[in-house]
Image (cartoon, grey):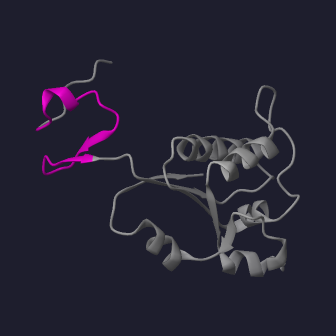
Amino acid sequence: MKMGRLPHAPPNLTAASSFAVTRCGEVRSVSGKAVVSLTTGLEDPEKVTVAFLVAVAAAEQQRPTLMFLTKEAVRLATAGVVQGVACEGCPPLPELAKRYTEAGGRLLVCPICFNARHLAEDTLVENAALGGTVPLWEWIGDEPATTFSY
């Protein structure tokens, strides 16, 4: 399928991946923050792998990147939990978590979900903090953010 020119977009921006055209025809940079929301833990390691791959790619491109962990995903923010390889050919989960941390990626962990599972705050990994939707929106701020949900 051939993609046509975006309405109201200057010709030199139609194929540029770092720009978007709003409904009003305004051209904006979309190279800002990235938020990856993850609800699944190691009960679905392939989904966790995909979420980490997306987050690692954003963080390694120097985008400010935050993973918002809810439900069973909160366990991934505790020391020693991120283990294994999801599938043949998949990168090991500990390697992805390490790359994410080294690239400056942060984990925001839903405190309601965390406490409902009786997890200990002193087991959180170095780049994780408890915080709900208000801190999430404060982190995003007024600038556009690219979001993914798994």
**Residue 111 part of the magenta-drawn span:** no
Nearer to us in this view, 114 or 129 = 129
In the image, taking residue 70 as reference, residue 3 lies left or right, namely: left
Quadrant for residue 60, please give it. top right
Observer able to see residue 119? no
Rendered location of residue 147, percent (x, y): 47, 53
The answer to whether 148 appears left or right of 93 in the picture is: left
Name the chief secondary structure element in magenta. Answer: loop
Front residue of this view, candidates 11 and 37 = 11
Q: Is residue 13 magenta?
A: yes
Residue nearest the observer in this picture, 144 or 46: 144
**Residue 98, percent from left and from top:** 75, 48
Q: Which residues are magenta?
A: 8-28
Q: Is residue 54 above or below residue 108?
A: above
Q: Is residue 91 above or below residue 117?
A: above
Q: Residue at x 43, y 66 (%)?
A: 140
Residue 66, percent from left and from top: 56, 59
Q: Is residue 1 visible?
A: yes
Spot occupied by residue 127 in the image (x, y as percentages of width and height) = 69, 63
